[in-house]
Image (cartoon, rainbow, N blue to C red):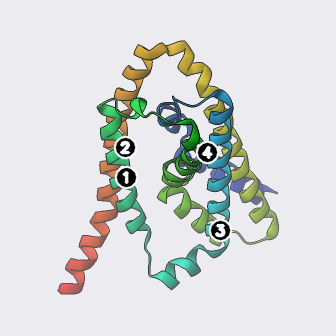
Amino acid sequence: MDIVLNTAILAFTSFFTLINPLGTMPIFMTMTSELSSAQKKRTAIKAVLVAFGTLLGFAFTGQILFQFFGISVNSFRIVGGIIFFMMGYDMLQARLSKVKVKASETKSYVTDISVTPLAIPMICGPGSITNIIVMMEDTTNLAQQATLIAVVAFVLLLTLIILIGSSKISQRLGETGNRVLMRLMGLIVMVIAVEFFFSGLKPVIIDIIQSSI
């Protein structure tokens, strides 16, 4: 019982920190600013479901897929860093809020942003993917595995609640408040992007140097 409880506590603290729904919320707010409340809710639900499915897939097949395709977690970090940096730069320039969505394109727009970048890599990023692969390998019985999956589902449920509630926060902030928040979060996202990029690039460079010696 203690092992299961420890697994639950470790899983919750690590996944809530890595998924960081509070950090995803401003990006969600800016990218869905032209959508209705119902469309925002649908976008959030799709993003969370895609993220959950992706995490489940990597939990049970992560190591096999990585080995089969020759993919490393460091590659995820590098690509994620580039995506984050481009997104953060647009936020810093207050560009994301200017996106206009035609009525005929709303459905495809919702689908596009709910998968990328919201589900992957914002909610389900390199950190959470790596974490679930490692934690699943460390489990020794079915109870621990079930606990791990249940905790991930709970964290994603909290993420969904926060994203859906972002509409009310956006309305209270107003246009000026949203722009200020977007620029501030854009700067933070760019800093995170740099950290992601170099945390993935450093091991790659070290491996190249060691292999050349």
Q: Earlier in the sequence, mark 4 or mark 2?
A: 2
Q: Earlier in the sequence, mark 1 or mark 3?
A: 3
Tell whether label 2 touches label 1 (CB within 8 Å): yes
- Residue 87 image label: 2
Give me the C-alpha separation between circle 3 and circle 2.
26 Å
Q: Amino acid at mark 3?
A: Gly
Give the residue drawn at x 39%, y 30%: 98
| 63 vs 174: above or below | below
Q: Earlier in the sequence, mark 3 or mark 4?
A: 3
Give me the C-alpha separation between circle 3 and circle 4.
26 Å
Of the pair 107 and 133, the residue shown nearer to us: 107
Q: Of tags 4 and 2, which is closer to the observer?
A: 4
Residue for badge 4 = 107
Q: Amino acid at mark 1?
A: Ile
The quadrant holding residue 81 is bottom left
Q: Of tags 3 and 4, which is closer to the observer?
A: 4
Count of numbered circles on the image: 4
Give percent across and percent down for residue 96.
Answer: 40, 34
Most distant residue in the front direction: 104
Q: Residues within 10 Å of mark 4 (few under 14, many from 20)?
A: few
Give percent across and percent down for residue 90.
Answer: 33, 38
Give me the C-alpha separation between circle 1 and circle 4.
23 Å
Residue for badge 1 = 83
